Structures are given as C-alpha cells and as structure tokens.
Amino acid sequence: MAYFAAVLARTEDGWSVGETELDNVETLADLADLARQASDDEEPVLVFIEQEDAWFAVVRVDGEEDPRIFVSDGAAAARSAYGEIVLTDELVGRSPGDGLDDLDTLVAELDDEDGAAGSASEDDDDSGTAADPDGVPAGPLGDTEVLAEFGITARELLAMSGEGAVPGDALAEIADSLGCAEVLEAVR
C-alpha cells in the first residue's frame, strides 16, 4: 500500500515541511524522536501520515511531552503496517497485555448477546462501523483537540474524518489552515 508521511515543524518563519520515510520507524517513540529532530526550540512538530486515502493520522510532538495522536479511522489504520505505529493500546482502549484471545472471547460473547436479543443481523457487519478484527473501533480515535491551538476545532477535525471525507484532502485542508498548503503540496 502506498503512503505519504510528512513532518511539519513550526519555526519563527512559519512551518517547515518535509516528506519523510517511515521504513525505520517501528514505534510511536521512534516517530516522536523523528519529529523532535526537526524541532526548533521546543516548538510543536506535526507528523502527517496518510495511506491510500483510506485513513490519516496527525501526531503532535511538543518538546519532550508525550505525543498527541488523532487517527481518522482506527479500523482502517489497523489494517496497515503504518497504523501500528500510532494505534497505541491507550488510543484504542486496550490495557497493555490484553491478549487477542481475551478480546476475541469478549467479541464472541457480545455477538452472542446481540444474536440472542435479536438486535444484530448479518448485514450489520457491512455497515462500516464495526470494529476491526483486532478490536480497533472504526471511525476517528484520539485527541480531537490536537490542532485546536492552530484554529482547527474538534468539530472541524471530525468533519474531515467523517464518512465520504478524503484523507488526502483533509491533510491539505489542515495544511491550508496552518498556512503551509503550498509547501505540503510541493513535497507530495
């Protein structure tokens, strides 16, 4: 699958934007280190990741603080090797050490309850709102306020992630709000 990743570093003169490779990035800590290398004086750094217009993520790194993450569609990201970088246990609501066997058992129990109550049908599985087989919920996940400081409200970010939204267009819209759309487009 094709992907696009860029690092946007805030500077005195605006935003510096550069495309980046994620081949050597295996964890969120690796991604945060990559972002910090682009930082000037503890200024915020954003990392955009987009995979084939299926999902996007914005990771914000402020100095040595823990990264803040927003993912447009958790289930779509879970089907991607790059999604593994941003889909932390905390983000998807799992406790560290939760085994997939336990999760599979829970999902099976919930399915049985739904079937017994008559509230679920075979067609519900194709609604696009079901969780990924690994238990990652479909739809937006994470910090919806990650870009509020830059004038993008939680409501706007969620609208960019909604049904029918195109992840590449969402990142372009975010970059436009930041004042660096032309630079981002140039590195795409």
Image: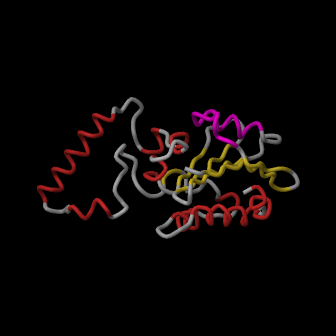
Which span is picked out in magenta?
A: 21-37
- In this rendering, would 92 be left or right of 112? right
Residue nearest the observer in this picture, 128 or 159: 128
- In this rendering, would 20 be left or right of 101? right
Residue nearest the observer in this picture, 101 or 80: 80
Residue nearest the observer in this picture, 6 or 118: 6
- Residue at x-position 49% and y-position 70%: 164
- Residue at x-position 27% and y-position 63%: 124
Residue reaching furthest left? 116
Residue 172: quadrant of the picture: bottom right
How far from the left and from the top, in percent, is residue 63?
A: 72, 38
- Residue at x-position 33% and y-position 35%: 100
- In this rendering, would 174 be left or right of 80? right
How far from the left and from the top, in percent, is residue 76?
A: 46, 53
Colour option used: secondary structure
Residue reaching furthest right? 13
- Residue at x-position 55% and y-position 40%: 85
Q: Is residue 142 located in the magenta-colored stretch of the structure?
A: no
Q: Is residue 25 located in the magenta-colored stretch of the structure?
A: yes
How far from the left and from the top, in percent, is residue 147?
A: 65, 57
- The quadrant of the rendering that contains the C terminus is bottom right
Q: Is residue 176 above or below residue 83?
A: below
How far from the left and from the top, in percent, is residue 46?
A: 69, 49
Residue nearest the observer in this picture, 1 or 129: 1
